[in-house]
Amino acid sequence: MSQPTDDLIARLTGNLAPVKRLTPPLWRAAGLAALATLFLTLLVAVRGLRPDIAIKIADPSFLTAVGAAWLTGVTATMAALEISLPDRSQTWIWLPAPAALLWVWGVGWGCLAHWVTILEARPVEESSVRCLTTLVAGSIPLALVLWKSLGRAKPLRRSATAWLAAVAVAAFADAAHLLCHVVEATVFVLLMNLGVAAVSIIVLGGIGGRVLPRAG
């Protein structure tokens, strides 16, 4: 009886390709964060720094918003990679929460501290289009790279993984946007930063939960 069993096992396993172990999430997150930072630096170089950057770098709320947006991207990337593995705790989803709160606070406080009405602001249509194109240009390449990395893990918790990845992409893109663009009206500052980021998270999170490869 053992010989047929051994033959069956040999036939079933004979053509299996060796499985390459995934690099630990910490190292993959560090690599992806470095790649995202390099890409966003190039994007800012191409688009150009905002004309009031010399003033803004002395503004604590601006520095908080930019730094927290970048940190949200890093921590959300780490959380997405961790939660994509079946043996990791669900509590990883909370890792980017503190940085995300600082990101929102930094943008919101900057708007309140420098409030101007729409009527007093200059026309914003052209600026708004440039803001939007910067956010899109920053989001799509990062999303493709992050989705490819996450797809290798074939996560069981696809929705949670996708939503965290979407937060990471939106945060990284907004860090570049904050460095590139000035929008004079407070309403449009919120719309271009938090509004577009929220839409990106909803769209990418919804799509990502469907397109990420299934386990097994």
Image: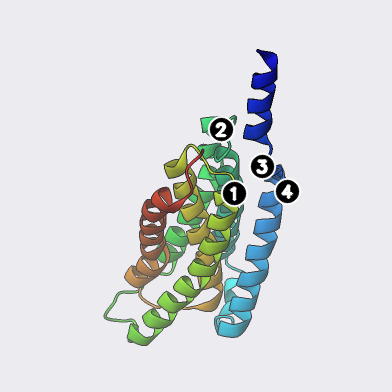
Q: Residue furthest top?
A: 1
Asked if marks 3 and 4 touch (Cβ < 8 Å), the reply is no
Amino acid on which the number 4 mark rests in the picture: Trp
Amino acid on which the number 2 mark rests in the picture: Pro
Kindly report the distance in space between the C-alpha atoms of the residues bearing marks 3 and 4.
Answer: 31 Å
Per the image, label 3 sits on a secondary structure element best described as loop
Q: Which mark is residue 15?
A: 3
Mark 3, Cα crowd under 10 Å, few <14 / some 14-19 / many 20+, is few
The structure residue drawn at horizontal position 40% and vertical position 61%, both measured from the top left corner, is 200
* Residue in the foreground of this view, choosing between 177 and 186: 177
Mark 2, Cα crowd under 10 Å, few <14 / some 14-19 / many 20+, is some
Judging by the rendered image, the residue that carries numbered circle 1 is: 152
Per the image, label 4 sits on a secondary structure element best described as helix
Asked if marks 3 and 1 touch (Cβ < 8 Å), the reply is no
| N-term-proximal mark, 4 vs 1 | 4
| N-term-proximal mark, 3 vs 1 | 3
Amino acid on which the number 1 mark rests in the picture: Arg
Query: x, y percentage for residue 23?
Result: 72, 45
Judging by the rendered image, the residue that carries numbered circle 2 is: 86
Amino acid on which the number 3 mark rests in the picture: Asn
The structure residue drawn at horizontal position 63% and vertical position 27%, both measured from the top left corner, is 8
Q: Which mark is residue 60?
A: none
Kindly report the distance in space between the C-alpha atoms of the residues bearing marks 3 and 1.
Answer: 21 Å
Kindly report the distance in space between the C-alpha atoms of the residues bearing marks 3 and 2.
Answer: 26 Å
Per the image, label 1 sits on a secondary structure element best described as loop
Colour scheme employed for the rendering of this structure:
rainbow
Does residue 115 show up? no
